[in-house]
Amino acid sequence: MTDQTPSTYGTQRKAAARNRVAIIEAAHELFAENPLVPLSEVAKRAGVGAGTLYRHFPTREDLILAAYQHDIDRLTTTADEVLARHSSAKAAFVEWFETLSAYIRIKHGLGDALHSAAAQELIAASWGPTTAAVTKLVDACVAEGAIAPGHDPADIIMLMSFLWRVANNDDGVAQGRRLISAVFSGLKEAPRPI
């Protein structure tokens, strides 16, 4: 028998869930600034103790993977929201891919942690939801006339991968925008059979 009543247990579970989200949000922000940030800084930013952080995420890799999963989950569910916020499907497409590229740049900065088998499974699992979100963006661009019908969204993701290779500074942003313009010029043409 335990002294905890069901309502106390429920309150503790809610607090634990809030702490987990706070830790992931803090990790997202701090990893974007410095992929090598000490986990003690993550705990401090999240407003929790080190014990709470390690109870949720026993290793640095566990936290990195959870933060990456959280970022991708959040992004893949925002295609409709981004489309609704812009008067142009093309502008929504550009914003969405620029956000994706920022997440991927963070991921690349996290180094070896994202080369494990668990990380590769997570990355593979994110492909389907990412492709579904890109399909919405592409369909809207087709309806708007910015992209010709028939382009494969998976191919477009591969094509847009240049965005996470440009420099993470103002020059890189400008280069990315020039390349996006070139991509849209090409996507106005229907795909040619090989």
Image: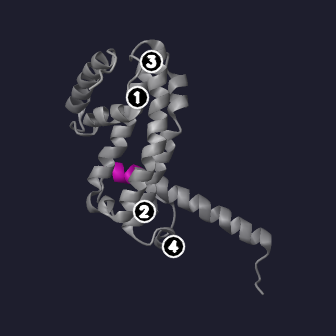
Q: Earlier in the sequence, mark 2 or mark 3?
A: 2
Numbered circle sitting on residue 95:
1
Q: What residue sits 60% from the left and 58% below the top?
A: 18
Which amino acid type corresponds to the residue marked 3 in the rendered image?
Val
Residue receiving disc 3: 142
Numbered circle sitting on residue 55:
4
**Chosen colour scheme:** one colour
Query: Horizontal placement of 177 versus 47: left or right?
Result: left
Numbered circle sitting on residue 63:
2
Which quadrant of the figure has residue 163?
A: top left
Q: CA distance from mark 4 to mark 2?
A: 11 Å
**Closer to the eye: label 3 or 1:** 3
Tell me where residue 33 appears, x and y as whole percent: 32, 49
Q: CA distance from mark 3 to mark 1?
A: 17 Å
Query: Horizontal placement of 84 versus 90: left or right?
Result: right
Q: CA distance from mark 1 to mark 4?
A: 36 Å
Badges 2 and 3: C-beta atoms under 8 Å apart? Answer: no
Segment colored magenta: 29-33
Which amino acid type corresponds to the residue marked 1 in the rendered image?
Glu
Q: CA distance from mark 1 to mark 2?
A: 27 Å
- Vertical position of residue 163 compared to residue 72: above or below: above
* Pick the front one: 61 or 15: 61
As helix, strand or loop, the secondary structure at mark 4 comes to helix
Badges 1 and 2: C-beta atoms under 8 Å apart? Answer: no
**Closer to the eye: label 1 or 4:** 1
**Closer to the eye: label 3 or 4:** 3
